[in-house]
Image: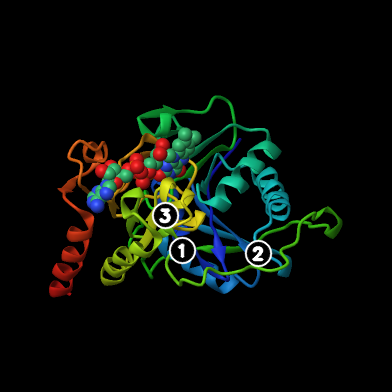
Amino acid sequence: MAQGVWAVTEQRDGAFRKISYELVSEGRRLADKLGQKLTAVVIGASMKEKAKELSQYGADRIIVADDPRLGQYTTDAYVEIMGQLVKAEEPSVLLMGASVQGKDFSARLAGRLGVGMAQDCTAFDIENGGLIATRPVYAGKAYTTVGFENSFPQMATARPNVMSVLAPDAGRSAELVDAQFTLDDAALKTKVAEAIKDASGKVDLTEADKIISGGRGMKGPENFKILEDLADVIGASVGASRSAVDAGWRPHRDQVGQTGKVVSPNLYVACGISGAIQHLAGMSTSKVIVAVNKDAEAPIFQKADYGVVGDLFDVVPALTEAVKKYM
Ligand SMILES: Cc1cc2nc3c(=O)[nH]c(=O)nc-3n(C[C@H](O)[C@H](O)[C@H](O)COP(=O)(O)OP(=O)(O)OC[C@H]3O[C@@H](n4cnc5c(N)ncnc54)[C@H](O)[C@@H]3O)c2cc1C
């Protein structure tokens, strides 16, 4: 019988991404409700030492699949290994991240295992001994709660930045297990030739704690400087609406929305963005939303916790100066 909750972590260059701590913390809560053990899964190269810290976030057991070929994520290698691990141990619940990597990984893994999966969930619970997942639908206009019928493992991905991270407890320890797997070079169809890093040095939007976004109201690429000034003062990343990206003002990696990134920061400031449903789909689970728009009827104000009706070219620099006084 399927037993145990698994949280599949994500690492980049040997460091865990924030979603990893969120998954382990959420996995701990679910494992407690089920009365089962929590296993954290780490796939990478030379990750054994680093993996130990996951015990502090509640893992009872840490399985490490360590191999020089696993330093960079590739779909075929990671899916092959997870497929083998899941078949060998049969966990009841499998949590992954709804990050760019996690969405690719989880969808292919669900296909390999032949199980259903709930993608991009914002809450989990246990009902009648099974996983219940809440996920936004219709571009965030509604939420649906889904369960799993006779499908194990019950697989779901968590939207980054939504699940809270447990305070690390250095007193906790976990069993460290070397994963048993075979990885045939001939089966690996893709190899990462080179990883080109974003030169901006800013936190990726999906992991950012604060985001300042600009839309068509910015009127041109050069004006994003006023958003960057505010972002620098409060330690935020800069995002954009699709209009700003389509106009060539910002790179596509900055786009927030249905066809861009789904973000969930603690603070989202929308400047000169009308609040089209496709934009809201990417940011409506942000904890606090602030809108700056000169049109009081703009739909973004229906979603905003705080709104400023005014010209962003006056409001944003004034906000930057005001914040500086408190720093
Ligand atoms: C299939 C599909 C997918 C899409 N995916 C996305 C997506 O991922 N992300 C996304 O963002 N959009 C997406 N869109 C596009 C979306 O429908 C909107 O067209 C887009 O979000 C509008 O961008 P905007 O708010 O920047 O521009 P606009 O709708 O033109 O709004 C500009 C706003 O700026 C305000 N403004 C102007 N000047 C000032 C000023 N000086 N001070 C203050 N406010 C000012 C105006 O009042 C206005 O509200 C998608 C559309 C489709 C059909």
The one nearer the camera, 153 or 116, is 116
As displayed, is residue 262 above or below residue 147?
below
Q: CA distance from mark 2 to mark 3?
A: 21 Å
Could you tell me which residue is drawn at 35 percent across and 30 percent down? 141
Give me the disc on residue 272: none
**Residue at the (57%, 71%) spot, across then down:** 14
Frontmost residue, 60 versus 253: 253
**Which percent across, then down, holds residue 154?**
54, 36
Q: Which residue is mark 2?
A: 72
Report whether 258 appears left or right of 142: right
Q: Residues within 10 Å of mark 1 (few under 14, many from 20)?
A: many
Q: Residue furthest top?
A: 149
Residue 195 in percent (x, y) is at: 64, 68
Q: Quadrant of the N terminus?
A: top right
Q: Secondary structure at mark 2?
A: loop
Q: Which residue is mark 3?
A: 22
Decide if ligand 1 comes within 8 Å of the CB at mark 2. Answer: no
Asked if the residue under mark 3 is in contact with the one under mark 2, i.e. CB atoms within 8 Å, the reply is no
The location of residue 80, given as percent across then percent down, is: 73, 50
Picture coordinates of residue 200, whole percent (x, y)? 46, 71
How packed is label 2: few (under 14 Cα within 10 Å), some, or many (20 or more)? Answer: many
Q: Amino acid at mark 3?
A: Glu
- Please, what is the three-letter code of the amino acid marked with disc 1? Ser
> SS at mark 3?
helix
Q: Which residue is mark 1?
A: 55
Residue type highlighted by circle 2: Gln
Q: Nearer the viewer, mark 2 or mark 1?
A: 2
96 vs 144: above or below: below
Q: CA distance from mark 2 to mark 1?
A: 24 Å
Quick check: 220 left or right of 107? left
Q: Quadrant of the C terminus?
A: bottom left
Q: Nearer the viewer, residue 11 or 175?
A: 11
